[in-house]
């Protein structure tokens, strides 16, 4: 099975005839069968909030939830990093918030996107095991952003380690060089779920951290040739995975939805059990 989704549901005008407004969740679900929700990174949502999301989508629709910033240790570079007690509470509250999705089989995975300073060392390798212990058997995807995890001499051991932990290693497409970013590595660490996250290839916007960095770093539109090459990679992996999910995050210029729909066409996908598409009657 191949699924395609976007980061957030609100900022994709191509899904609503380019109207100048936010896309509603029930409108989004008329086009795609999954979405990545980034809000939990900034604050663990209430159970009632997650339940409201669930109530707005078809029964087969699934969510990817981004792990909270304390869970991915972004706080270690702040003035008030979490102590062990607070970190325990964040994990506990996050798991509780996920229960409406878990109970209804609508949690595809929890995405642990680590900060660029989370490099490969013994402490961080141990932390991955602590995550698995804290999250129980919930589905987990890991996204590294420091190139040390992809060192040629050590990469195979990390892949084996993630396999033992039953964690999906996100296949990332983003600008990278010797000092930043990570390479495109189409490997399978969890045959239950392969997850692609496509950030675009805007090297200038990605590496130049000026005041407009956050609004420019994913300013990129994949061309048809690039999408066909991606489709070839996906099709080669298809026999070896229960599900391959592709998430487009290249949305600084609102290009994610058009690229996602184009890839859907290239792969000749037909998503079933979507919400009824909103018809323009005027």
Image (cartoon, rainbow, N blue to C red):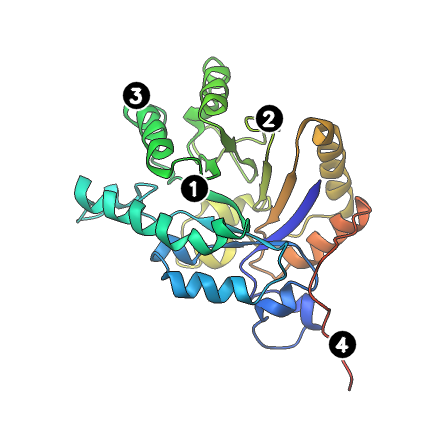
Q: Is residue 83 visible?
A: no
**Where 88 falls versus 187 (above or below)?**
below
Residue under label 4: 279
Rendering quarter of residue 183 = top right
Q: Earlier in the sequence, mark 1 or mark 4?
A: 1
In-front residue for pair 136/220: 136
Q: State the residue position of label 2.
A: 187
- Which of disc 3 and disc 2 is earlier in sequence? 3
Q: Which residue is mark 3?
A: 122
Q: Total marks drawn?
A: 4
Residue 99 as seen in the image, left or right of residue 105: left
Q: Position of residue 181 (x, y in %)?
A: 48, 36
Report, in whole angstroms, how far the alpha carbon at label 1 lies from the one at label 4: 37 Å
Give the numbered dot on residue 113. Answer: 1
Give the mark nearest the N terminus, 4 or 2. 2
In the rendered structure, the answer to whether residue 205 lies left or right of residue 276 reads left
- Disc 4 to disc 2, C-alpha distance: 40 Å
- Residue 256 appears in which quarter of the rendering? bottom right
Q: Residue at x 47, y 12 (%)?
A: 153
């Amino acid at each position: 099975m191949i699924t395609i989704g976007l980061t957030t549901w609100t900022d994709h005008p191509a899904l609503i005839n380019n109207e100048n407004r936010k896309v509603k969740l029930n409108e989004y679900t008329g086009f795609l069968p999954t979405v990545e929700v980034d809000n939990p990174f900034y604050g663990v949502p209430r159970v009632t909030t997650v339940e409201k999301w669930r109530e707005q989508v078809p029964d087969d629709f699934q969510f990817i939830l981004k792990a909270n910033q304390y869970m991915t240790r972004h706080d270690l570079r702040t003035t008030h990093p979490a102590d062990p007690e607070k970190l325990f509470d964040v994990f506990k509250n996050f798991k509780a918030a996920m229960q409406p999705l878990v109970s209804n089989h609508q949690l595809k995975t929890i995405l642990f996107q680590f900060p660029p300073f989370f490099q490969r060392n013994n402490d961080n390798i141990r932390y991955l095991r602590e995550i698995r212990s804290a999250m129980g058997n919930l589905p987990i995807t890991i996204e590294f952003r420091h190139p040390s995890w992809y060192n040629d001499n050590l990469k195979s051991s990390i892949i084996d380690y993630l396999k033992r932990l039953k964690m999906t290693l996100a296949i990332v497409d983003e600008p990278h060089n010797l000092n930043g970013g990570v390479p495109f590595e189409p490997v399978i660490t969890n045959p239950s779920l392969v997850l692609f996250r496509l950030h675009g290839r805007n090297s200038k916007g990605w590496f130049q951290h000026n005041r407009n960095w956050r609004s420019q770093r994913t300013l990129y539109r994949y061309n048809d040739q690039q999408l066909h090459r991606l489709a070839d990679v996906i099709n080669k992996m298809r026999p070896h995975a229960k599900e391959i999910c592709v998430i487009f995050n290249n949305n600084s210029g609102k290009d994610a939805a058009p690229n996602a729909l184009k890839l859907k066409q290239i792969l000749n996908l037909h998503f079933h059990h979507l919400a009824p598409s909103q018809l323009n009657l005027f």
